[in-house]
Amino acid sequence: MNTRKLTDKKEDIEIAAKIIADGGLVAFPTETVYGLGADAMNPQAVKKIYEAKGRPSDNPTIVHIASNDDMTVVTDKVTKDMERLMERFWPGPMTMIVQKKEDIPYVTTGNLETVGVRMPENEVARQLIELSGRVIAAPSANISGKPSPTNFRHVIDDLDGKIDAVICSSPSNIGIESTVIDMTGETPVILRPGYITRENVQWLLKKNVEMDSALNRKPGDDEDFSPRAPGMKYRHYAPDAEMIIFQGKPEAVAEAMDLEQRERQSLGERVCIISYDGDEKAAARNFFAQLRQADKDGYDIILAAALPEKGIGFSVMNRMFKSASFNIRKV
């Protein structure tokens, strides 16, 4: 398959929209990461997403919409709390888990009775949805398990020749996937942390918001871990190189990382250092790209300094822990 490299001009977005409408696959920019899109209502098209990515069939996709009116395609039930979240955080990096309509294919939802839905802030993404006349199922546009793509070159590295087209636009300005909030029960539950934090949601809804108990910890070997949202699998976002996370007071972390770096280099290993000095937004924006660059540059090991697990830092650490397969060194 020859993957077309399209621009983000309207005439090229129209070409991409026709590919979606005809049952094809298009990678497109969003503010979080690049997505791999197909017509969410076309089971055969969505199956192509799983095939191109090598994605487990129980890992649900997120349905992307262009307007609040599109919610009627996805679900029959929109609560007052959902309306408040939509008004405040859409378009933007928030996904809501809702009860799916009967005609949403199970391949789109990972065989669940619920579906994730989001309205992206990125204008190119919304134009693509509008021009296609479809709601678009889209996980991240990468090989399953690899770091998420935050620019079109990452998509080409992983999926060139496997998908119909990629819209070559600007890098993602947030850099981590959307916050996923389960809205199917009385109490909202964050299944995947993101740029919109628990504190943001609690302040808006004026009620308690729970965090999924599996977040930021390594599941046990005997634990049933069927995902309710994308990105909840244990091994995810993983670079090729070994990775160690150093967690503790900043001075102790810096000293331990320096010692590890010198020891590894004495053995002839190439060492990549990742540290953000507590800048959680820079960490979110750059982390996946740095993992990919480390692999491209052939580093043997990545040493990363942990961020405080609060706010956006908690969301970045969720990705960092999984990238390192929970290889954590407390100092």
Image: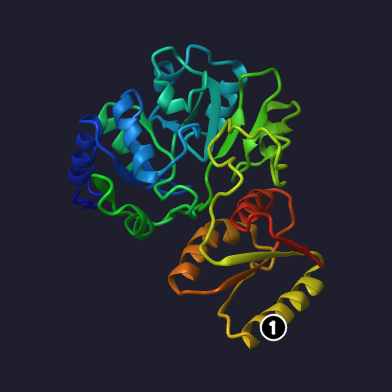
Decide if residue 45 is on the left or right side of residue 63. Answer: left
Residue at the far bottom: name it: 266
- Residue density around tag 1, few if under 14, some if 14–19, many if 20 or more, within 10 Å: few
Res. 182 image quadrant: top right
Residue 155 rendering spot, x and y as whole percentages = 36, 54
Residue 103 rendering spot, x and y as whole percentages = 39, 14
Q: Nearer the viewer, residue 27 or 67?
A: 27
Q: Residue at x 58, y 42 (%)?
A: 233
The quadrant of the rendering that contains the C terminus is: bottom right
Q: Residue at x 78, y 70 (%)?
A: 250
Res. 128 image quadrant: top left
Q: Residue at x 60, y 17 (%)?
A: 80
Residue at the far front: name it: 222
Decide if residue 199 is on the left or right side of residue 272. Answer: right
Which residue, given by chain and number where applicable, does mark 1 sit on? 263
Res. 121 image quadrant: top left
Residue 112 rendering spot, x and y as whole percentages = 52, 22
Residue 241 rendering spot, x and y as whole percentages = 54, 67
Which amino acid type is shown beneath numbered disc 1? Glu
Q: Establish if 181 lies above or below 157.
A: above
